[in-house]
Image: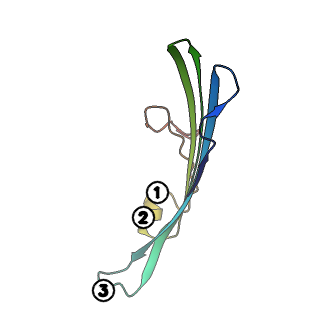
Amino acid sequence: MLAGSTGWLGTGSQWRFGGSVGIDFGQNVIDVYASPDYEEIVGGEEGDDRTFTYRFFADHSFGSDLIAAAFTFADTDHEELLEPGDAARRRGGCDRQRRDLDDSGGRLPSASE
């Protein structure tokens, strides 16, 4: 993960603004074994995650009053590759998927649904 921010930047007037960005990359590997003794791998999956976040913030003072606003955007992507095995056959073989989330965190239907 990598993140950075400008902090508050003044303009010499009543305006202040700033921004921040964050980047996160993740990876996972899951093996499927033939039996509980973990001797033979018969399948599995690999996953890659990527998340970018951007934030812009600003405020303006009017004497003793202050107006402030912020905008935040996040883009999250998750890809899976299922290797041959029982779990992969139940899901239709090897498959690459992208899941987009709406603002409430729910999964949006893919083009094939």
Q: Quadrant of the N terminus?
A: bottom right
Image: 110 above or below 80 = above
Q: Position of residue 24 (x, y in %)?
A: 56, 55
What is the distance, in whole Å, between disc 1 and disc 2 at their CAs?
7 Å
Tell me the number on the disc at residue 37.
Answer: 3
The residue nearer to you, when weighing 25 against 62, is: 62
Residue annotated with mark 1 = 91
Amino acid type at mark 1: Arg
What is the distance, in whole Å, between disc 3 and disc 1 at their CAs?
25 Å
For discs 3 and 1, the disc positioned in front in the rendered view: 3
Colour logic: rainbow
Residue annotated with mark 2 = 87
- Examine the image and state in which quarter residue 112 appears: top right
Q: Position of residue 79 (x, y in %)?
A: 56, 55
Disc 2 and disc 3 in contact, CB within 8 angstroms = no
What residue do we see at 41% from left, 85% from top? 40
Amino acid type at mark 2: Ala
Judged from the image, the secondary structure of the residue bearing numbered disc 2 is: helix
What residue do we see at 50% from left, 39% from top? 101
Judged from the image, the secondary structure of the residue bearing numbered disc 3 is: loop
Amino acid type at mark 3: Asp
Image: 110 above or below 57 = below
What residue do we see at 51% from left, 70% from top? 84
Q: Which residue appears farthest toward the left when viewing the image?
A: 36
Mark 2 or mark 3, earlier in chain:
3
Judged from the image, the secondary structure of the residue bearing numbered disc 1 is: loop
